[in-house]
Image: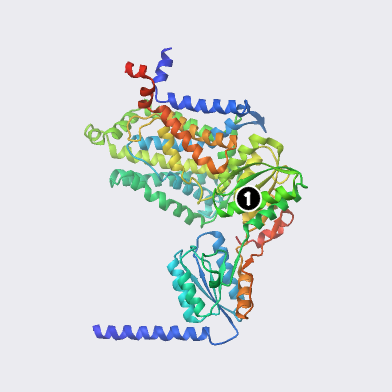
Amino acid sequence: MKKIIGVLLCLALAAGFAFANGSSDTADSGSDKLVVGFAQIGQESGWRDAETASLQWYASRNLDTIELHFADAQQKQENQIKAIRSFIDMGVDVIGLAPVVETGWDAVLMEVKEAGIPVIFLDREADVDDSLYSTFIGSDFILEGQNAAVEMGRLLNGKGKIVELEGTVGASVANDRKAGFDDTIASQFPGIEILGSQTGDFNRAKGKEVMESFLKTYGSEIKGVYGHNDDMVLGAIEAIKEAGLKPGMDIVTVSIDGVKGVFQAMAAGEANVTVECNPLLAPQFFQAAADLKAGKTLPRWIKSDEGIFRAETAAKDLPTRQY
Amino acid sequence: MEILQKYRRARIFWPSVIFLGILLFNTIISKGEFLSITMMDGHFYGRLVDIFRNGSKLMLLAMGMTFVIASGGIDISVGSVMAISGAIACSVIRGNLFPFFQGSVFFALVLAVAAGALCGAWNGFLVSRVRIQPMVATLILMVAGRGIAQLITNGKIITVNSPSYYFINGGYILGLPFPLYLVIILFAGLLFFTKKTAFGLFLASSGINDKSSRLAGIRVENIKLLVYVFCGAAAAGAGLIESSGIKGADCNNAGLMIELDAILSVAIGGNLLTGGRFSLGASICGALIIQSITTTIYAMGVPPEVIQLVKALLVITISLIQSEKLSIKLLPAKAAAQ
């Protein structure tokens, strides 16, 4: 009995190998298809889910030109490393990686380099030597802050007093979005004064509480509010309404991210502008992968395409928002 | 004079003095602006109103926590229960949960509070029947609760559009915020319940020594179960206030770390964390102190980087003011009197 089971197991293993070989044959059979392996972190937030959906949707729409091998690492680095090794065995053209942590990638990326496969970092970077990856596609948080400042300047015609709702203290996103905004306001809009700046921890309840306090301190002097993310501003809008003022009219709003909620608020005339932080990176990712396969050199950092959305078009944009 | 002497010796004395001290400090710093209250759209508007309204959820939590702590336990799952209650209420109103009752705020509230009580019953069951240490027993729900809330809302922030739901946080009766009435009604009810029935005595007794209480004929298990159920329901109420304030359910952030503030309220109120005699009023004062510290920090424009430090320093100072040993050292006369 044991022998039979043993034989069966061996057969199963052999079949598995044959199957694995078979699939790798199709991967590097020299067809014109762009074969991409992508090692995703996992499902950690709505933002990342949107990114994953974007990659899979884009690949499924271009089945005749793109072959995507997608690996979900469930937030574990060793799973991502395993996935990358299997991509090497498959002989993919390009490997995409959203590194779950910054360090510990040197060894596996060296193997990738020896196999002659280019690597693209998507939305996060890893702490490795420049020679180990080809390009990084992601957001420029400082630029987002600068764009927000320009929008604020436009809304207020370059004159007025505003308050700022900061993200979590010490988060790099918050630091960059503050630096980009504050510097641009100081250099380009001398007529705009930032009355106060306080952390709202990137969430609605805190954003509301801080805004309530700002309204008590400065009253109707406040003409605008800038939030490092949309959720804090959505909280602030409630505080503004409770103070008997009209958000979007008496106090204009500019925030960053582009979540659905803020589009609803803009469509209702209660918010003014959101600067997108785009998770729908698939078009840029596959374009970069195709360029790498064709042997082109890419810039070290490809900034993600990020729109600026205003209240005027919010009603039209709302149905198309995916996150 | 006699009443004053009695008040001076009551547990609520120092917390209430500290709370008034914080208000006085702010009034002086802001040259009176802090206390200014104006009428806005037919209701009072000012920082004092903010303290009572934003502090209402902490006051609710503090009342539940006072009972649990008096019984010799602790409940660190209240923040997660808040997330669950908000998630259920918003899902019911949106029709994602029980589509039959879509839009029914009444049913949403009943269900949310019932869910909170159920969570409390689970904690109480683990503590009183299975006899798991309270910290560990409630840790389970603290960790799992947020996951349950995420499941209910599918991991998204869900927003609701229902004026009667907003009323829970943003409504006013006779110019005063509605959540304040919730606190007052509950406080009055509990005060009556603990003072006019033997419950308060039984509770304190089980907290001090549950073995001898059991031998004396008190049903310690049932009392413990009851206080956890009440604490869960109070947390659900706090969750409703929070969720109504942002007009939606934000499971990642609702009540995050608030269990520590709730425990701190009870402690600042001068109640012993080891259980036994307790004062609800003192805990409410403790909650008001914590809320007014936050309001003070915002009003003074403390830079965000140092907020935690300033809070820590204030809490240390308050604890020192209440420390009996320290006051005996500093005031030898008092030591002699004792």
Q: In which quadrant will I find the C terminus of chain A?
A: bottom right
Name the residue located 33 percent from the left edge and 85 percent from the top edge: A10
Residue B211 falls left or right of residue A17:
left
Residue A151 position within the rendered picture, expressed as x and y whole percent measured from the top left: 72, 52
The residue indicated by pointer 1 is A178
Q: Quadrant of residue B188?
A: top left
Residue B148 falls left or right of residue A2:
right
From the viewer's side, name the closer residue of A23 and B153: A23
Residue A75 position within the rendered picture, expressed as x and y whole percent measured from the top left: 46, 63
From the viewer's side, name the closer residue of B115 and A164: A164
- In this view, the residue farthest toward the right is A157
Q: Secondary structure at mark 1?
A: helix
- In this view, the residue farthest toward the top is B1
From the viewer's side, name the closer residue of B147 and B97: B147
Q: How many marks?
A: 1
Name the residue located 35 percent from the left edge and 35 percent from the top edge: B273
What residue type is disc 1 on?
A: Lys
Residue A7 position within the rendered picture, expressed as x and y whole percent measured from the top left: 30, 86
Examine the rendered structure and indicate whether residue A107 appears above or below residue A226: below
Q: In which quadrant will I find the N terminus of chain A?
A: bottom left
**How are the colours assigned in the image?**
rainbow
Residue A310 position within the rendered picture, expressed as x and y whole percent measured from the top left: 72, 55
